[in-house]
Image (tube, helix red, strand yellow):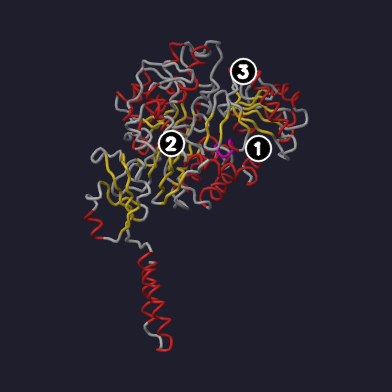
């Protein structure tokens, strides 16, 4: 269209008088140059690369990809592209001639909002983190944790923030945490110690006062969900009671904006172009969507977010299941406001508790110390939600960590399948923290898919072999090979910050089954390289229901590429987790990762 407008203006130039002919001739020259330099709707951009790993089995390797608008028109060598280039205006872009391209990486279970919130907190974690803009050293003992917490409180005492939030506390590594301990450390400063899982937190008295919470608010929750005396809020107690009181602050522009900017840079530096927001509405639906508009759409971020509402929380906030379904269905079946947000009939249900806090539900013999897991959603509510969304044709993603949590989920959906048969990939098991062959076979027989977090084994295998599961059962953390052997499609996700939002790191984790201490928990075998790379590209797209547009570089698909400094199919396996990412191409637009 730009070229057409220029040509119209040039034709108008010829109708001018002889007195201005010289000026018009000069203007005509400018118009011709402008028309030649402008990119028209028909123009093709050809990106030349050292290698293109397409993840398309019919055309696995290429060296050039032709893009028109936001889609791929052809992939191969420059010679292969010649029919297209002879027929259409084009330009050659060789900025990637020394790079390797692969499909834009997909993290199908990552919460952009949660990442932005976490980037606005103080990190004190049991493992080290290498971020795009710095490093976070590990705190591996109670003494180290308390020393870092005291230092952080001192450094933030004049910040003006209404509440100090630190994320990463893990009792197994950092020791117990109570309201009394925090009151002694910071009697006048509201403090929230956010557990590593983000499914629980400990607050001091000043923080409870800031949130205007009283013991009456805790009365209808069990002692395992809200331990008022110790300021400990877990699962439903945290998500339904504490988190809504924090929402006006943590979703405010002053708090969240910079966190979103850091989160975007972090995702680009990981080669990610698509994420699944698996629990939209978990904090506050309206505030979340307003925040997405301000920080994803208005800032034109180079990745898309797939909206997957949290059924249980939305039911609580919208007058029950039927009302919340109508609200959700109206939204998800409407046109998405921008390319950064993806709508569709997807819903998130919650079965058992978090892996990092040992709140997942285990079958016999349970936990070594005898404590019980948690059900996030009351089982009768879970069954009602499952039936409603199953019968309405939704793809249902279920947060299920322990083998008992997965068994319960399969019990419910096997009954629904008997009543109303649906095809494969209608049910996605999310996380898949601990399972055995019995569970794996049932998943395969049902036709479910799995979006797994392989970092559970990497980050927790060492400690859970000693505390919670024991060595035998620790080997069953994220046992993905049994799924692959039975043909179950697998995606790998980070659930950031439960794991680094680094799909190639997750691929390494799933391939090696290596812990942070360097132990290898095999058998079972790790995934093959091909299985692991498919799990962050084509199979991840399939599990989100986006395989028609994403997951491989081939004609007709969206032009999403990760731009890498080395070839993920040939580098040594230990180099895969740290493979450098130059940036991304998102729907044909190039975005380089920030250079530190």
In the rendered view, tell whether residue 170 sits above or below residue 590. Answer: above
Report the mark closest to the observer, 1 or 2.
2
Horizontally, residue 463 falls left or right of residue 531, namely right
Considering only order in the chain, which callout, 2 or 1, is on the residue closer to the N terminus?
Answer: 1
Question: Which residue in the rendered view is the most extreme toward the bottom?
Answer: 18
Provide the major secondary structure of the magenta segment: helix
Label 1–label 2 contact, CB within 8 A: no
Q: Is residue 369 magenta?
A: no
CA distance separating discs 1 and 2? 37 Å
The percent coordinates of residue 203 (x first, y second) are 69, 28
- Density class for disc 1 (Cα within 10 Å; few <14, some 14-19, many ≥20) is some
Which is nearer the eye, 392 or 161?
Answer: 161
The percent coordinates of residue 135 (x first, y second) are 56, 31
Which residue is found at the position 35% from the left and 50% from the top?
94
Report the mark closest to the observer, 3 or 2.
2
Identify the image quadrant of residue 511: top left
In the rendered view, tell whether residue 35 sits above or below residue 132. Answer: below
Q: Is residue 115 magenta?
A: yes
- Density class for disc 3 (Cα within 10 Å; few <14, some 14-19, many ≥20) is some
Secondary element at image label 2: loop
Residue 458 in sight in this render: yes
Which is nearer the eye, 222 or 469?
Answer: 469
Residue 418 in sight in this render: no
Find disc 3 in the rendering and name its residue: 141
Which is nearer the eye, 271 or 354?
Answer: 271
Find disc 2 in the rendering and name its residue: 580
- Give the position of the N terminus as an image quadrant: bottom left
Identify the image quadrant of residue 576: top left
**Part of the protein shown in magenta:** 114-118
Find disc 1 in the rendering and name its residue: 246
CA distance separating discs 3 and 2? 32 Å
The percent coordinates of residue 474 (x first, y second) are 45, 15
């Amino acid at each position: 269209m730009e070229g057409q407008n220029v040509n119209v203006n040039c034709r108008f130039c010829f109708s001018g008088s002889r007195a201005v002919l010289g000026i018009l001739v000069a203007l005509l020259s400018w118009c011709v140059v402008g028309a030649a330099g402008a990119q028209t709707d028909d123009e093709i951009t050809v990106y030349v690369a050292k290698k293109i790993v397409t993840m398309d089995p019919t055309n696995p390797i290429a060296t050039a990809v032709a893009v028109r608008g936001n889609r791929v028109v052809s992939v191969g060598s420059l010679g292969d592209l010649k029919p297209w280039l002879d027929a259409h205006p084009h330009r050659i872009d060789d900025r990637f001639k020394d790079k390797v391209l692969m499909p834009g990486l997909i993290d199908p279970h990552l919460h952009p909002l949660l990442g932005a919130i976490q980037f606005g907190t103080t990190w004190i974690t049991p493992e080290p983190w290498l971020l795009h803009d710095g490093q976070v050293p590990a705190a591996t003992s109670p003494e180290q944790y308390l020393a870092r917490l005291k230092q952080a409180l001192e450094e933030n005492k004049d910040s003006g923030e209404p509440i100090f939030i630190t994320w990463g506390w893990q009792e197994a590594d950092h020791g117990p945490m109570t309201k009394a301990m925090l009151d002694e450390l910071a009697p006048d400063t509201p403090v929230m110690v956010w557990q590593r899982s983000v499914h629980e937190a400990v607050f001091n008295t000043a923080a409870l006062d800031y949130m205007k919470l009283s013991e009456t608010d805790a009365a209808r929750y069990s002692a395992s969900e809200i331990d008022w005396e110790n300021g400990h809020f877990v699962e439903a107690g945290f998500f339904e009671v504490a988190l809504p009181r924090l929402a006006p602050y943590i979703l405010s522009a002053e708090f969240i904006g910079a966190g979103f900017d850091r989160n975007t840079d972090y995702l680009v530096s990981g080669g990610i172009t698509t994420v699944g927001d698996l629990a939209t509405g978990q904090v506050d639906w309206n505030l979340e969507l307003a925040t997405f508009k301000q920080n994803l759409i208005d800032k034109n971020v180079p990745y898309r977010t797939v909206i997957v509402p949290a059924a249980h929380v939305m039911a609580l906030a919208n007058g029950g299941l039927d009302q919340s379904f109508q609200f959700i269905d109206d939204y998800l079946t409407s046109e998405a406001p921008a390319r950064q947000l993806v709508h569709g009939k997807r819903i998130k249900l919650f079965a058992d508790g978090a892996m990092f806090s040992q709140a997942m539900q285990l079958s016999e013999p349970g936990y070594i110390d005898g404590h019980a897991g948690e059900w996030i959603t009351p089982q009768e509510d879970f069954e009602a939600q499952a039936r409603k969304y199953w019968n309405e044709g939704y793809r249902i993603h279920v947060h299920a960590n322990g083998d008992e949590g997965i068994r319960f989920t399969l019990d419910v959906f096997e009954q629904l399948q008997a009543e109303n048969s649906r095809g494969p990939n209608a049910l996605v098991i999310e996380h898949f923290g601990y399972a055995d062959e019995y569970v794996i076979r049932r998943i395969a027989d049902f036709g479910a898919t799995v979006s797994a977090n392989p970092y559970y084994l990497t980050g927790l295998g060492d400690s859970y072999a000693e505390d919670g599961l024991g060595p035998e059962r620790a080997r069953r953390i994220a046992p993905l090979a049994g799924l692959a052997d039975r043909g179950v499609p697998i995606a790998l996700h980070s659930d950031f910050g439960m794991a680094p939002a680094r799909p190639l790191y997750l691929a390494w984790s799933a391939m090696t089954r290596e812990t942070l201490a360097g132990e290898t928990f095999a058998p079972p075998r790790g995934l093959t390289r091909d299985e692991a790379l498919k799990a962050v590209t084509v199979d991840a797209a399939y599990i989100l229901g986006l395989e028609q547009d994403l997951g491989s570089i081939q004609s007709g698909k969206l032009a999403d590429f990760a731009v890498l400094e080395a070839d993920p199919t040939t580098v040594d396996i230990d180099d895969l987790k740290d493979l450098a990412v130059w940036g991304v191409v998102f729907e044909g637009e190039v975005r380089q990762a920030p250079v530190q």
